Amino acid sequence: SLDDVQFVVINLSSHLNDLTSALLATLFSLASDSIVIYQNETTLDFSQWSNKIILLFTTTQFAATLKNVPTCVTIYTLNSGDFNVEDPYQFATIQDLVNQLFDAIVQKYRLETCRYNQIGEPDKANEQEMKANKVEQEFKKVYEQMHNNSSKKTSNNIPLTIIWLMPKVGDMESLKEAFGEYFSSYHLFFNEHTCHYYIVKNEHRNDIFLIIDTSSEQSIANGFRQFSNVKKIYFYGQSTNSDEKTFHTRNDLYYRLAYDLIGHYGELGDNYQKNDQLKEARESFMKTIDDIEYDTNYSHANTHWLLLYDDHRDQIGPSIVVEVPHAHLIKFICTYRTLPDCQRHIRNNRQKKIKLFITNNKLVDWDNNTGVSDLDLKKLFIYCNTDRSFIDMQTWNGCYQDKIEVVFMYHELDYRLTYAGVDYAKEVGDTFKTNDGLYRKFLGDACRLSAALQNNFQHK
């Protein structure tokens, strides 16, 4: 019975945009007896819903803190950037997570309709069917209203999704490792009709690149081409068909995907620049240190990794933007633009071992800054923005000269951060083995960093 199902939404408010906030409010108004919404919670008492099936919608960070979760609880999580593409309970975007809540509510009403029909209560069955239809109609109405009111904005920011129909084992994981956040979400389907339904439901929500395994009939592509949001269709696998759009190896497929992505984001970047949205245009093409988001779970570790980098406003002459392609995976390091902020972190965490990545400019500033000689550093990793500074740092005789681990050029930063993160995430995970959620989280970070490192070696 729907009365036995409790939908719980917790700590998602900071992730909601105008559209998803309106959609969530609509769902709450239509099924308020079955939905509770909490904000800024640190714990959750499941016993308040005894004898109920609980569907919990939250973030991976909050889910990782839950202990002794009852078997009656199903958890759906928002995990943008590094989610498991083959896990049906993880979602890359808040839109996908809200859509899942919508689907779950409608499905429960439909199941109630079937149940009442089976036991011979048509009036109650009709009531449940009307509720399901009402949710669908209102959800669609709100979406279309919001979409029409911000059509210009959504046309510039519409997410790009990739779908793989009938993938082989490991296909989606390999794809995710290769392209990361260049796609906003990854979905796999093993049934043509389920895939078709998803595309119909999301026709105005995202653009889609579709990969179809050659085990499927190529004629099914015609059914997908009718949708305006299906931008590209690829056939992949071993086939005797000479169709030029069939790719026989992952490398060939990935090469074509990369080519089409450049075209897609090139058009997107042009649109951004026409609207003077230069920051978004840059983000369409590359990731930098600014894209690193620190996971505060690492603050509990005995060792803290910090990155102090140049604020370009302080530099004279042309500045170098340091590209960090794996920024979305490098969650273990806390970044700072200014010397005082970084030094304050060290001063407030004297009991921790501090390992610091720092630019040659910032190290010179540090050396000229009096009154900080009491700040202890375990290791120093110096990256340089010019050949001249690289030579100078090789013979550095200023502060912390005995702590220097390595001096390198700026273009190596992504590799060295990724390499350092693998061992560190494993090390932190080992210290949290008694906390299953955190242990799996840190181990997952290590695995993703390791896969990225391996992928780099293969490309080189």
Image (spheres, grey):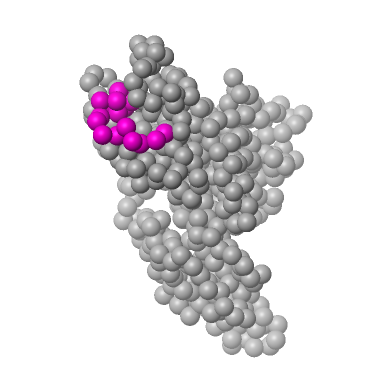
Q: Based on the picture, tell me whether residue 372 belongs to the magenta stretch.
A: yes
Q: Is residue 389 visible?
A: yes
Q: Based on the picture, tell me whether residue 353 belongs to the magenta stretch.
A: no
Q: Please indicate whether residue 460 sits to the left or right of residue 327 in the image.
A: right
Query: Residue most toward the front?
Result: 374
Q: How far across and down, in percent of the image, does residue 253 sit? A: 62, 30
Residues 156 and 80: in front is: 80
Q: Please, is residue 34 above or below residue 156 in the view? A: below
Residues 60 and 384: in front is: 384
Q: Please, is residue 133 above or below residue 385 in the view? A: below
Q: How far across and down, in percent of the image, does residue 106 sit? A: 55, 70
The residue positioned 45% from the left and 77% from the top of the image is 32
Q: Please indicate whether residue 374 sits to the left or right of residue 89 in the image.
A: left
Q: Quadrant of the C terminus?
A: top right
Residues 194 and 18: in front is: 18
Magenta-colored span: 362-377
Q: How far across and down, in percent of the image, does residue 429 sit? A: 59, 47
Q: Please, is residue 211 above or below residue 438 in the view? A: above
Q: Please indicate whether residue 170 sits to the left or right of residue 162 in the image.
A: right
The residue positioned 23% from the left and 28% from the top of the image is 314
Q: Please indicate whether residue 79 sits to the left or right of residue 24 in the image.
A: right
Q: Is residue 103 visible?
A: no
The residue positioned 32% from the left and 52% from the top of the image is 150
The residue positioned 58% from the left and 26% from the top of the image is 456
Q: Please, is residue 390 above or below residue 61 in the view? A: above
Counting every numbered tag in the picture gives 0
Residues 318 and 181: in front is: 318
Q: Quadrant of the N terminus?
A: bottom right
